[in-house]
Image: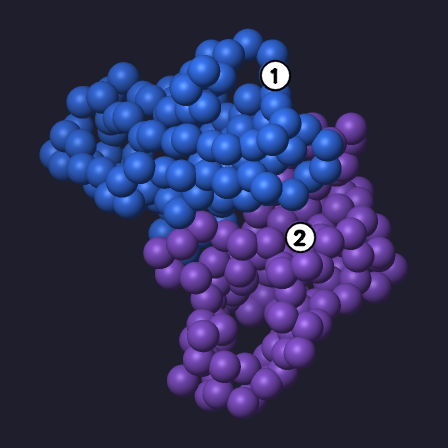
Amino acid sequence: AQSVTQLGSHVSVSEGALVLLRCNYSSSVPPYLFWYVQYPNQGLQLLLKYTSAATLVKGINGFEAEFKKSETSFHLTKPSAHMSDAAEYFCAVRKAAGNKLTFGGGTRVLVKP
Amino acid sequence: EAGVAQSPRYKIIEKRQSVAFWCNPISGHATLYWYQQILGQGPKLLIQFQNNGVVDDSQLPKDRFSAERLKGVDSTLKIQPAKLEDSAVYLCASSLERGGQDTQYFGPGTRLTVL
C-alpha cells in the first residue's frame, strides 16, 4: 500500500521568504508524485508532477520539487513567497500502473506581509 | 476548455435525509472520480469510473452511498440516509486516461453540512 506524509499541517512564512513544504511517501513500486494547491472554496489545481523523468520538477507559479529516492521525499519549494501563495497544499502519490491518487493530509500556508 | 462542473456548490441537510450531487467532467475524459474531503484532511477516493464502468469503489460506504455514470459522461453521487460524519466537501475529478500518466482535473466541489 502506498501512503503520503506531509510534515506540518500549518506553515507561516513572510512575504519574500523561502517556502518549503515537506512530503515523504511510501510505495512498493516507483511512484508518480504530485503537488496540488487548493484555494479557499475551490477545487484542487495541479502545481507539478514527477513521472520518472527529471528528478527536479518545475511547476506553475514559481514552484518546484525534487524527487529524492534515497530519502523517499518530494519536497516543494518556492524561493520567494507571495501573498497569493496563501492556500492549502497537498502532496499525492500514485502507482505507476493505475490512476488512483493517495493524498497527504495537507499543509496550510499563511503568508505574512 | 470548460473545466469540471459540479452542483450544487453548497448543501445543508438534516441527518437521515438524502442528498445527491452532480458532476459533469471535461469533455472527452473517460475517467471520472469522486473524492470525499473531510475538514483538515486530504481527499479520499470514494469511487472511480472508466467510461460508465466502476474501476474502484473499495472505499465507498455502500450501505448509504451510491454513484452512477450514465452514458459515460455525467455522474451523480447519492447519500441515503446521511449521517453527521458525512459532512465534507465532495470533489469530482476527471482524466483523459492515457497510459496511466494523465492528470486529474478537479471541480470546485460540493460542501455538504449534515445537521
Residue A28: x %, y % from top left: 60, 31
Residue B91: x %, y % from top left: 55, 56
Question: Does any portion of residue B34 appear in the rendered image?
Answer: yes
Question: Does any portion of residue B73 appear in the rendered image?
Answer: no
Q: Amino acid at mark 2?
A: Tyr
Look at the numbered disc 1 and give the secondary structure of its residue. loop
Is residue B108 rendered to the left or right of residue A77?
right
- The residue at which mark 2 appears reads as B33
Chain B tint in image? purple
Q: Quadrant of residue B79?
A: bottom right
Residue at 35% across, 56% down: B40
Chain A tint in image? blue
Nearer the observer: mark 1 or 2; the answer is 1
> A82 above or below B30?
above
Residue at 27% across, 40% down: A8
The C terminus of chain B, quarter of image: bottom left
Residue at 48% across, 62% down: B89
Q: How many marks?
A: 2
Q: Quadrant of residue B38?
A: bottom left
Front one among B26 and B81: B81
Q: Amino acid at mark 1?
A: Ser
The N terminus of chain B, quarter of image: top right
> A18 above or below B18?
above
Write down the chain letter for disc 1.
Answer: A
Look at the numbered disc 2 and give the secondary structure of its residue. strand
Write down the chain letter for disc 2.
Answer: B
Front one among B53 and A28: A28
> B109 above or below B42?
below
